[in-house]
Image (tube, rainbow, N blue to C red):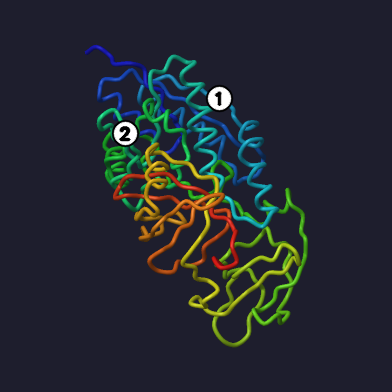
């Protein structure tokens, strides 16, 4: 059988990328793999060495070439240092989104094309639809694994050169396929840590880059309840590791006052300070090039949004305002967090998204 053009698969060492490569081989493509090392340290939480070994075993089983590239410098300079800046400003960044945009779908793809790839493929649970020469990013069919949220900021032009082979399958089907094919990592657990940093105690990890800045923990009435080590170590809605107790419902982080270095906490998950109906969004990135025009021609656009991964789609209306976008949810949303991304959808189609930021006091 004549081979189709060369596809280079981002081979992480996990089962999703392994199955992606195997599926493409079955479809008649010439397939090679490229493993990225994007974080290096001697801590046991860093799985880079094991991931590379797992990738080698998979490629040996599949009979394909494995290339290896180290992007740890680029990741630290362009992704991790940016996240540190945002933590220090009191925001709660999501490095995985920036990693996809800058590392996986820019640095990685450019390197793969230099190796001769016609297209690249990854093990993401997402789909790309080509309709009337217009490409759209769609949710993966396995809604519990859909990763379009993390992909919303990639350059739309790259989608023409990207394949998501497992986007039409479920995680269970992926593991069953890998087991049937005898892939050595068919039962390897999924990674749940921050992209490339690993599943380490994140507060202690962050302290090595952002030293403590102690301050007060206060109630809504201004009562001093305890002390914190630094606002950058906390996020809105956080319940654990506050070090305060007492009668009544549990305490939750409701706000971070950077000017006074105070951490505001409230009691009870349903406290009004933890719910917001309107939010302001900056750094907008649209995968659908027509959306900005639609918004400018119509005062509002009805759609759905996720303000965090794994959240159910929430119905909302969006409108362009000075400096960004205003999102008005049909129902209040819990623990809206500055620095996190909000991603917009029409059905399964991902429109794009932006970063939730403070702007107007009436939105608080």
- Asked if residue 16 is positioned above or below residue 251 in the image, the reply reads above
Residue drawn at (57%, 80%) of the image = 267
- Asked if residue 91 is positioned above or below residue 262 in the image, the reply reads above
Residue at the extreme bottom: 247
Name the mark nearer the viewer: 1 or 2: 2
Identify which residue, 53 or 27, lies in the foreground.
27
Secondary element at tag 1: strand
- Judge left or right: residue 282 versus residue 130: right
Q: Which of the 4 quarters of the picture holds residue 159?
A: top left
Residue 166: x, y in percent? 31, 38
Q: Which residue is mark 1?
A: 69
Residue at the extreme top: 2
Q: How many marks?
A: 2
Which quadrant does the C terminus fall into?
Answer: bottom right
Residue drawn at (54%, 82%) of the image = 249
Identify which residue, 24 or 153, lies in the foreground.
153
Identify which residue, 103 or 339, lies in the foreground.
339
Q: Which of the 4 quarters of the picture holds residue 90?
A: bottom right
Q: Which of the 4 quarters of the picture holds residue 238?
A: bottom right
Q: Which residue is mark 2?
A: 165
CA neighbours of label 1 inside 10 A, class few (<14), some (14 to 19), many (20+):
few
Residue 25: x, y in percent? 30, 24
């Amino acid at each position: 059988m004549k081979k189709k053009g060369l596809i280079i698969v981002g081979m992480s060492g996990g089962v999703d990328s392994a199955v992606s490569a195997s599926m493409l081989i079955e479809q008649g493509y010439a397939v090679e793999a490229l493993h990225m090392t994007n974080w290096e340290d001697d801590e046991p939480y860093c799985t880079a060495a094991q991931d590379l070994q797992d990738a080698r075993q998979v490629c040996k089983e599949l009979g394909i070439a494995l290339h290896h590239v180290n992007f740890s410098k680029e990741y630290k300079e362009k992704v991790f240092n940016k996240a540190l800046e945002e933590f220090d400003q009191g925001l709660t960044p999501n490095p995985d989104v920036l990693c996809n945009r800058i590392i996986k779908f820019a640095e990685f793809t450019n390197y793969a094309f230099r190796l001769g790839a016609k297209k690249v493929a990854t093990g993401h649970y997402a789909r790309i639809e080509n309709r009337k020469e217009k490409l759209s990013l769609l949710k993966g069919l396995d809604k519990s694994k859909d990763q379009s949220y993390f992909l919303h900021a990639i350059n739309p032009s790259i989608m023409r050169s990207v394949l998501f082979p497992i986007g039409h399958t479920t995680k269970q089907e992926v593991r069953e396929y890998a087991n049937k094919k005898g892939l050595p990592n068919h039962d390897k657990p999924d990674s749940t840590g921050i992209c490339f940093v690993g599943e380490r105690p994140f507060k202690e990890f962050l302290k090595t880059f952002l030293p403590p800045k102690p301050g007060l923990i206060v109630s809504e009435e201004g009562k001093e309840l305890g002390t914190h080590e630094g606002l950058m170590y906390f996020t809105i809605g956080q319940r654990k590791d506050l070090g305060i107790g007492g009668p009544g419902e549990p305490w939750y982080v409701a706000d971070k006052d950077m000017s006074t270095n105070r951490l505001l906490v409230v009691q009870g998950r349903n406290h009004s300070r933890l719910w917001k109906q309107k939010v302001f969004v900056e750094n907008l990135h649209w995968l659908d090039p027509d959306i900005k025009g639609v918004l400018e021609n119509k005062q509002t656009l009805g759609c759905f949004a996720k303000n965090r991964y794994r959240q159910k789609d929430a119905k909302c209306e969006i409108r362009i305002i000075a400096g960004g976008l205003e999102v008005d949810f049909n129902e209040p949303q819990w623990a809206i967090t500055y620095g996190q991304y909000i991603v917009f959808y029409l059905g399964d189609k991902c429109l794009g998204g932006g970063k939730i930021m403070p702007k107007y006091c009436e939105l608080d």
